[in-house]
Image (cartoon, rainbow, N blue to C red):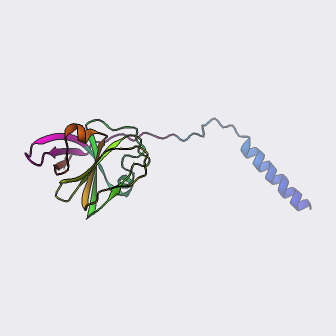
Amino acid sequence: MKKSMLFFMSLAFIISTSSCKDNNTSDKVLTQEITFKKDGTLRVYKKASDSLITTFNLEIAEGDYETQTGLMYRKSMPADAGMLFVFKTIEPRAFYMKNTEFPLDIVYIDEHKQIVKIYTMATPMDPTSLPSNLPIKYVLETNGAVTSSLGILEGDRVEWNIE
């Protein structure tokens, strides 16, 4: 009985002294907004005339984490920017907008760097799958409605350089 009473008194003392310390630090978890980082430049050309449509500053999603996260958790992206995903294999893929806070255009690109499918104004936070329907090697994400406002169409082609 004395041993158990001594144990509980010791435990109470430890708990009371550890919880009575001054706590001047905040328990808040601070997050830092992810900002765009320019890795290169991407150019879009008209299929029929081979004329330049536009140029985007390019951020490349590298590695598993960046590829899986993409533009999720970001508040925005510069108007002249895009994120390029480069995959090792050529196969049909699907992207979604879960945890993406602003509308995007999702541009699927085949191994010849030709645009094969475009989703315009994909809805923020929507977990619905947006499939390429064809084998692709690359995906470009731009701000929503950019492809339609610039006249970028399926069949147009892209080129890029890494800085």
Q: What stretch is highlighted in magenta?
A: 30-57
Q: Is residue 154 magenta?
A: no
Residue 54, how many percent across, how many down?
17, 39
Q: Is residue 92 left or right of residue 160?
A: right
Q: Is residue 151 left or right of residue 76?
A: left
User: Nearest the camera: 56 or 149?
Assistant: 149
User: Nearest the camera: 128 or 18?
Assistant: 128
> Residue lying farthest right?
1
Q: Which residue is painted at 80% across and 48% down in the image?
A: 13
In the image, residue 77 sits, relative to residue 127, either above or below, namely: above
In the image, residue 60 sits, relative to residue 21, either above or below, namely: below
Q: Which residue is painted at 25% across and 37% down in the image?
A: 80
> Residue lying farthest left?
49
Q: Which residue is painted at 18% across and 48% down in the image?
A: 161
Q: Count up the numbered dots.
A: 0
Residue 89, how many percent across, how many down?
27, 64
User: Nearest the camera: 71 or 124?
Assistant: 124
Question: In which image quadrant can residue 144 be found?
Answer: top left
Q: Which residue is painted at 42% across and 41% down in the image?
A: 101
Q: In which quarter of the image is the N terminus?
A: bottom right
User: Nearest the camera: 136 or 155?
Assistant: 155
Q: Is residue 142 left or right of residue 43?
A: right
Question: In which image quadrant can residue 123 be found?
Answer: top left
Residue 78, how many percent across, how many down?
30, 36
Q: Is residue 46 magenta?
A: yes
Residue 118, how many percent across, how many down?
26, 49
